[in-house]
């Protein structure tokens, strides 16, 4: 009987520890030019998990795996990134087992627009007539 109570207590404690979710992903600013840095923030709210793994995919084919614990990263997680090409990107954060870190719970995403910087157009300069010498001038 005592083993059963102990097992239920451990199960409830484990559920409480892993019940917190990834609540939000934000990108600041949400629209940039190629090469301009953005700050990506992954937040887990009021009671963030203390020990879990997550992966942030940047929408350009690359990702970053993050271990949440007292020696590594803590929530909110902040990443800085610059994109090399224009387009619309979806940045996702989701729990993933990383070595001994069980996955954080949840999955959230945010969108980013990267544009080609438009260069200012110089005002048109009128062409001056050329002073070509004709056969008569020679």
Image: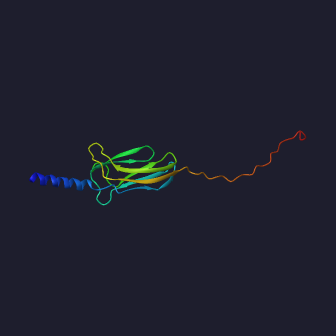
Is residue 116 rendered to the left or right of residue 91? right
101 relative to 78 in the view: left or right? left
Q: Quadrant of residue 47?
A: bottom left
Q: Would residue 1 be found to the left or right of residue 124 on screen?
A: left
- Where does the image place residue 116, in percent across and percent down from the top left? 55, 49
Q: Residue at x 38, y 45 (%)?
A: 64
Badge count? 0
Q: Residue at x 32, y 46 (%)?
A: 96
Q: Residue, x 48% and y 47% (percent of image)?
A: 83
Name the spot of residue 86 as percent of width and height, x first. 52, 48
- Residue 80 locus on image (x, y percent): 42, 50
The residue lying at 45 percent from left, 52 percent from top is: 38
Q: Is residue 68 visible?
A: no
Q: Residue furthest right?
A: 136
Q: Is residue 78 among what the camera can see?
A: yes
Task: Using the image as rendered, state which of residue 82 and residue 52 is in the foreground.
Answer: 52
Q: Is residue 63 left or right of residue 114?
A: left
Q: Nearer the viewer, residue 78 or 138?
A: 78
- Percent across and percent down for residue 42 are 37, 54
Q: Residue furthest left?
A: 1
């Amino acid at each position: 009987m005592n083993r059963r109570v102990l097992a239920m207590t451990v199960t409830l404690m484990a559920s409480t520890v892993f019940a917190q979710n990834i609540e939000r992903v934000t990108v600041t600013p949400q629209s940039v030019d190629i090469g301009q840095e953005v700050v990506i923030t992954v937040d887990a709210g009021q009671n963030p998990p203390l020990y879990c793994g997550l992966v942030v995919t940047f929408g350009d084919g690359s990702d970053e795996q993050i271990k949440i614990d007292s020696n590594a990263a803590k929530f909110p997680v902040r990443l800085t990134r610059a994109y090399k090409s224009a387009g619309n990107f979806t940045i996702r954060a989701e729990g993933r087992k990383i070595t001994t870190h069980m996955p954080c719970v949840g999955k959230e995403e945010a969108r980013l627009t990267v544009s080609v910087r438009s260069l200012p157009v110089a005002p048109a300069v009128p062409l001056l007539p050329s002073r070509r010498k004709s056969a008569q001038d020679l």
